Amino acid sequence: MYNQAREARKRARAEYGELFDSVAALLFKHDPIGINFETNTDEYEPEARTILPRLKDCHSVDDLQKIVHEEFVKWFGPADAGPSHHYRDIASEIWSIWLRTKHTQSGDIG
């Protein structure tokens, strides 16, 4: 199990680079499920791995908020995930990171 998680983390970092680390850290900082015990900094990496591929389908913070909430419902269930509006700040911050990442990548292509 540990090796699978390590391999999944390695693949996500290879595919998404700093975006993966930034989103996982942001989720840990906001800690919407209350599992941040300060030493388990990789706790939200699985959720980051499932949110990131869906970013390409987002056209707004509202779209992203819906996706982040859906992923947390999938991972933790509706009761623990709570209502969608609790994910607004998280979605806004991920959206900002995503836009900066896209801008940086498009600038590199030029």
Image (cartoon, helix red, strand yellow):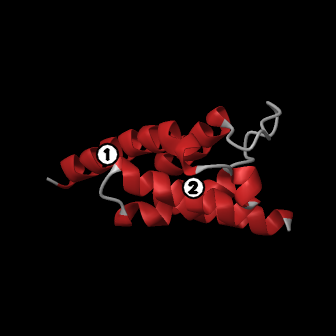
Q: Is residue 17 visible?
A: no
For label 2, the SS is: helix
18 and 71: which is toward the camera? 71
Amino acid type, mark 2: His
Question: Disc 1 designates what residue?
Answer: 99
Label 1 or label 2, whichever comes before in sequence order: 2
Amino acid type, mark 1: Leu
Q: Residue at x 54, y 55 (%)?
A: 68
Question: Disc 2 designates what residue?
Answer: 69
Q: Residue at x 37, y 39 (%)?
A: 96
Residue 109: x percent and y percent?
20, 55
Residue 35: x percent and y percent?
80, 41
**Foreground label between 1 and 2:** 2
Q: Is residue 71 visible?
A: yes
In this view, 5 is above or below 19: below
For label 1, the SS is: helix
Position of the N terminus by quadrant: bottom right
Residue 18 as seen in the image, left or right of residue 28: left
Residue 100, picture quadrant = top left
